[in-house]
Amino acid sequence: MAIKKLNLDQTIFELGRKLKAHIKSGGDAHLPASDDNNGFMTTSQLTQLKRVYNGIYSGREALPQNTDILSLGPGFYVGYGFINHPGAASPSTPASWITLVDVDSGNDGRKKIEVTDSFTGYKWYRTIHTGGAPTSGTGDWVRIEGELTLWEGSSQLTSPVTFSQSLVNSNGTHSFTKIRVYYRSDYDQRGSVDAGFSGASINCTNLNNDANISAPDLMEAELKFTNTTAVCSRNVRTNLYNGKTDNTVYSRQEPGSINITKIVGVK
């Protein structure tokens, strides 16, 4: 096919038209990017932007049952019956609940996947490293713990306190994986203990600050839970000390000195 020849005026006009198309598109903006053609951004950048925009503003992409979480590309998803779900009985067992999945990806097969159960709020994450092998990165799902405060203050709980939320759901299942109790002693020992749903036991020790006097305190508090309350059923301090004229060790019971500062449900 013969090449069309242009005179000088036609050449200048054609160059100007192509320059406007490349830079200003009629004097207002670059040509928009499309799924097939680069514009103000590349087609790949446009695809990623759509995934983010759709996930945030237009709702998550709903996926069919038996979708493998590890096979998902970047995006925001929701579905029922995912495969390779960290909360299911096995990787091949579909999870029988609704789940939200966020996937970020990098180059060379790298991914970060975050999974959140819609009903329980339980959350896990997983990374896949260079090459894309599922056993790379974290190698498995890592549980992310979250705390929901049920009660907070500073008290020996001699009278019951009421939780902000019941320990059980309406269907009778537990609302949390465990209960965590934070405490502080009168001597400023601080800590926390993880407990079940019936109660907690706290033990700590205080050594006398005078090196010439041996008089340690052994402290213990026991808490009892119902589905909606907590109370301290026992709070005692046992003081050990030496006699003045011999090395005999004596003990005496003293008032309790453990104060509960916060009770949380662990999701």
Image (cartoon, rainbow, N blue to C red):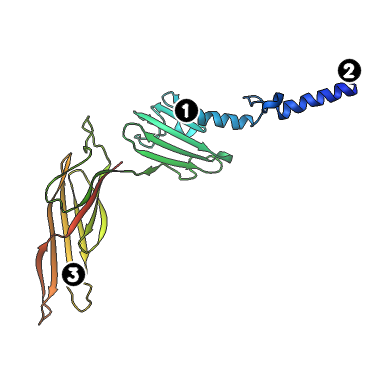
Location of residue 216 in the rendering, given as x and y in whole percent from the top left corner: 18, 69
Location of residue 154 in the rendering, given as x and y in whole percent from the top left corner: 21, 53
Q: Residue furthest bottom?
A: 245
Kind of residue indicated by mark 1: Tyr
Residue, disc 3: 216
Location of residue 149 in the rendering, given as x and y in whole percent from the top left corner: 27, 44
Depth check: give the residue in front, 13 or 224. Answer: 13
Q: Residue at x 81, y 26 (%)?
A: 15
Residue, disc 1: 57
Up-down relation of residue 244 to residue 179 (above or below): below
Residue contact between numbered discs 3 and 1, judged by CB atoms under 8 Å: no
Q: Quadrant of residue 241?
A: bottom left
Residue, disc 2: 2
Q: Quadrant of the N terminus?
A: top right
Q: Residue at x 10, y 69 (%)?
A: 251
Kind of residue indicated by mark 3: Pro
* Circle 1 residues within 10 Å: few <14, some 14–19, many ≥20: few
Mark pair 1, 2: CA separation: 52 Å
Query: What secondary structure is found at the residue carrying circle 3?
Result: loop
Query: What secondary structure is found at the residue carrying circle 1?
Result: helix
Q: Residue furthest top?
A: 1
Mark pair 3, 1: CA separation: 61 Å
From the image, state whether disc 3 or disc 1 is nearer to you.
1
| Mark earlier in primary sequence (1, 2) | 2
**Image side of residue 204 versus residue 249, left or right:** right
Up-down relation of residue 231 to residue 83 (above or below): below
Query: What secondary structure is found at the residue carrying circle 2?
Result: loop
